[in-house]
Amino acid sequence: MTQKEIFVAHRSEFKERERKIVPHGNTEIGVYRANGKLYAYQNLCAHQGGPACEGLLMPKVEEVIARDQTYQGQKFNYEELHIVCPWHGWEYDLQTGEMVADRKFRLKKYEVVERGEDIYVLV
Amino acid sequence: MSWYELPTSDIHKMAVEELDTSKLLTNAARQRDERNYKDLLIIDVDCHHYENESLREIVDYIEDPVMKHSAQMATTGGTGVQTSFLPGLVGYQDIAGRVTRYPLRKSEKTPTGKVHRDVTLTLRWMDAMGVDYVCLFPTPMLAMGSHPQTEVEVNMARAYNRWLTENILYTESRIKSMLYLPFNDPDATYKMVQDFGDKKGVVGFMVTASRYAQVYDNAYMKTYSLLEELGKPLAFHAGYNWSDPILATTNRFIATHALGFTFFNIVHCANWIVNGLPVRFPKLKIIWIESGIAWVPWLMQRLDNDYKMRSSECPSLKKLPSEYMREMYYTSQPLEMPDDLSVLETTFKMMNAETQLLWASDYPHWDMDLPSKIYDLPILSEQAKRNILGENARSLFNLDTSPRFPK
């Protein structure tokens, strides 16, 4: 079956650290440009159906544990960004769409293509 | 400025610059339409508003002139730090802003006019979810049971209840409430039921559970008798108090919340049963709110096991503690969803969910549930779904739903 292309934006209008939400049928697709790459996911949380792509994008929070196993605090890991559903806070790995607390749940992922100056999502 | 602040069009931030509940709940409205909720009675037995946003209006209803003056001064000027009339709690319900309806709440626009903003906002999310009627509760006042001054709880409870009935319940018939009881003062509690039991939209009364009152104290018996006579249920609304000595040992809110919202209700429920209160007030309907339901089979098993060895300590009981618990009512939210649904199925069976479980959203709080949480469960019959989503509450509250479902 031939995939349909949905226009997202001209490359010049979609900068690093931006997000576009494009309509697709009775739902939407969230498209992200982060760390030099493009990602696209259905705007539908695997939990209760929230608009997962309309919330924050947060760096992963990590624990700082010293060699002697003592707790030293927490820090952000800016290499792993999380899509956070605004309804309840379910967090998804931006690179894979997997829910970070239980990776059997995931956002539906779409392929993004760049042709000339234009960016499309394949559906 | 850090790059994940609210709100902005930047990738790391919000997709909208102001909160619009209807837009935030677009996917809920899609569920409503896909599942055809318009033909289904849906009653939400536990939802909230933020009465702190109307605090200046509420304190004008305080009857004690000296306290009223103090409250008016505290809410109209000063430093802007939290007032002693709504002290609130330490906690992180919004998951550091990840649940965006918290930080954006004040940006939501409502029309100016005669309809109270809280009515507009409540109807906005009710309509998006497909909810017909709600039982509305306050938010910061859930912590009033730990206020060191009993007279502040009593005066604020009366002021809030007068304000709520006159400004919300009288004006919007889809919004009901079980009114706040100043439970740390048994006489004031009794008077509250006397004075407000017949007010429009009052479908019962509510005790905030995070407190140290002994539900079996003789001082409460006249209130239970009166409630039984009026046919109005008594609800215990769960809460946490991070300053509670045992909860103070937790250092992450996840533990404070998961434990706090269950164990206060567990303690009150155990005390209610072992003191034989179900035997003394057999027609008084008891509702346990916002503790989820996983604790129910746990407490049933614990009490039954001990009761078989120590029945001499609770000689009033005529049957097993679990059998009394099976006659009580429970709200569903936050409904635990185990991977193995047979666990949930067993829980439903043990608590007679088909007749005793009441769907609740807890909206707009962070761990809210949609009606689909019940509607989509493959382990429930169609009738059980209808009962849990609305019919059980209609019977319990003797609610006239004909305005929404004309015959």
Image (cartoon, helix red, strand yellow):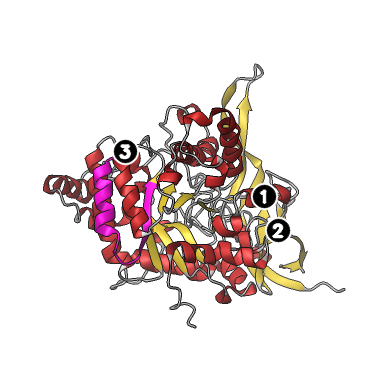
| Mark 3 closeness class: few <14, some 14–19, many ≥20 residues within 10 Å | few
Q: Quadrant of residue B359?
A: bottom right
Provide residue B197's location: percent of width, then percent of height. 30, 59
Q: According to the image, label 2 marks what residue? A: B379
Nearest to N terminus: mark 2 or mark 3: 3
Give the residues in magenta.
B179-207
Rendered position, B244 above or below B388: above
Q: Which residue is mark 1?
A: B344
Looking at the image, residue A66 sits to the left or right of residue B60; the answer is: right
Q: Amino acid at mark 2?
A: Ile
Residue at disc 3, secondary structure: helix
Q: Secondary structure at mark 1?
A: helix
Q: Is residue B176 visible?
A: yes
Say which of A20 and B69 sits in front. B69
Q: Residue shown at 41%/70% (left/top)?
A: B174
Mark 2–mark 1 distance (CA, rounded to whole Å): 9 Å
Q: Evaluate if marks 2 and 1 touch, with contact meaning CB atoms under 8 Å apart.
A: yes
Report helix, strand or loop for mark 2: loop
Sequence order check, earlier mark of 3 and 1: 3
Task: Report the residue that reaches farthest toward the right.
Answer: A1
Q: Is residue B187 magenta?
A: yes
Q: Position of residue B66 (x, y in %)?
A: 12, 45
- Mark closer to the chain start, 2 or 1: 1
Cα gap from disc 2 to disc 3, whole angstroms: 43 Å
Residue indicated by mark 3: B218
Q: For the residue marked with disc 1, what is the amino acid? A: Leu
Q: How busy is the neighbourhood of tag 1: few (under 14 within 10 Å), some, or many (20 plus)?
A: some
Q: Position of residue A34 (x, y in %)?
A: 66, 52
Q: CA distance from mark 3 to mark 1?
A: 37 Å
Q: Is residue B345 magenta?
A: no
